Amino acid sequence: MIERTFVLIKPDAVQRGIVGQIIERFERVGLRIAALKLVWPTKEIVDEHYPNVEQWLRSVGEKALKGYEKQGKKVEEDPIEIGKRVKRMLLDYLTSGPVIAMVLEGNHAVKLVRKIVGPTEPLEAPPGTIRGDFTKDSYVSADTLGRSVRNIIHASDSRKEAEREIRIWFSESEIIDYERPDIYVILGKDYKKLKKE
Ligand code: CDP
Ligand code: MG
């Protein structure tokens, strides 16, 4: 189904000058750039982007605990407490420099973009994914250095999350509707039937 997703190229990637290489990967699979801008995020926008909801804090903490376990590191900390710490570090990470915010549209865009991006911890991200190809950062290294995992990029992980995030970063007038003629070749001339509502 044709849908939209939200992507943020994080400050480490902008500073390393790899923005073009990242965007190229989305363009070549047929995802259409519907909106794009360079912004230096404020604490307020990052705070809204990563909400203080228990479910998110817990899942972030649990991811870290699994990562520690894989590295043979024993940590007994409440996942929510880890989540709160990660949230504070994310505020520093994402306000440390400009980011590229994007809306991408295409067939199964949410799932496809997550696949191209790869799993959260770069050490576990396979080669061929953005996170796996551009860094090998890990939860253990991030923890030792007292910072959040520098994993190059953010991508929404559901349609609901995508729509919420798009509203945070873009106004409707910044999202542009136009055609990419090669989509007809990739999906067939009736591809608009795949458009949701
Ligand atoms: O970005 P993704 O959806 O894959 O992961 P998340 O669970 O939504 O976490 C958001 C971001 O928090 C990650 O991309 C990392 O930058 C950071 N994080 C971290 O620094 N340490 C963790 N233990 C978990 C997440
Ligand atoms: Mg996420």
Image (cartoon, helix red, strand yellow):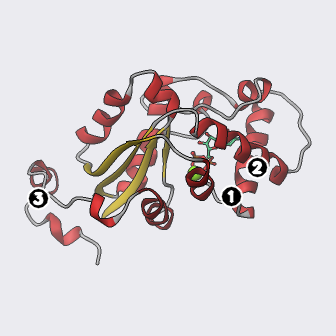
The answer to which image quadrant residue 169 occupies is bottom left
Q: Are marks 3 and 1 in contact (CB under 8 Å)?
A: no
Instruction: Give the residue at x 73% y 44%.
Output: 88
* Pointer 3 local density, CA inside 10 Å: few below 14, some 14–19, many at least 20: few
Find ligand 1 in the image and state its quadrant. top right
Which of discs 3 and 2 lies nearer the camera? The answer is: 2
Q: Are marks 2 and 1 in contact (CB under 8 Å)?
A: yes
Which of discs 3 and 1 lies nearer the camera? The answer is: 1
Q: Are marks 3 and 2 in contact (CB under 8 Å)?
A: no
Q: Which mark is residue 188?
A: 3
- At label 3, the amino acid type is Gly
Closer to the chain start, of discs 3 and 1, is 1
Q: Is residue 76 left or right of residue 116?
A: right
Residue 32, given in percent of the width and then of the height, sits at 24, 50
- At label 2, the amino acid type is Gly
Q: Is mark 1 within 8 Å of ligand 1?
A: yes
Image quarter hosting the C terminus: bottom left
Q: Return the residue at label 1.
A: 56
Badge 2 marks a residue whose secondary structure is: helix
The CA span between labels 3 and 2 is 44 Å
Q: Return the residue at label 2.
A: 83
* Pointer 2 local density, CA inside 10 Å: few below 14, some 14–19, many at least 20: many
The CA span between labels 3 and 1 is 39 Å
Residue 166, given in percent of the width and then of the height, sits at 42, 60
Closer to the chain start, of discs 2 and 1, is 1
Closer to the chain start, of discs 3 and 2, is 2
Above or below, 101 relative to 134: below
Image quarter hosting the N terminus: bottom left
- At label 1, the amino acid type is Trp
Q: Is mark 2 within 8 Å of ligand 1?
A: yes
Q: Is residue 135 left or right of residue 63?
A: left
Who is closer to the viewer here, 106 or 124?
106
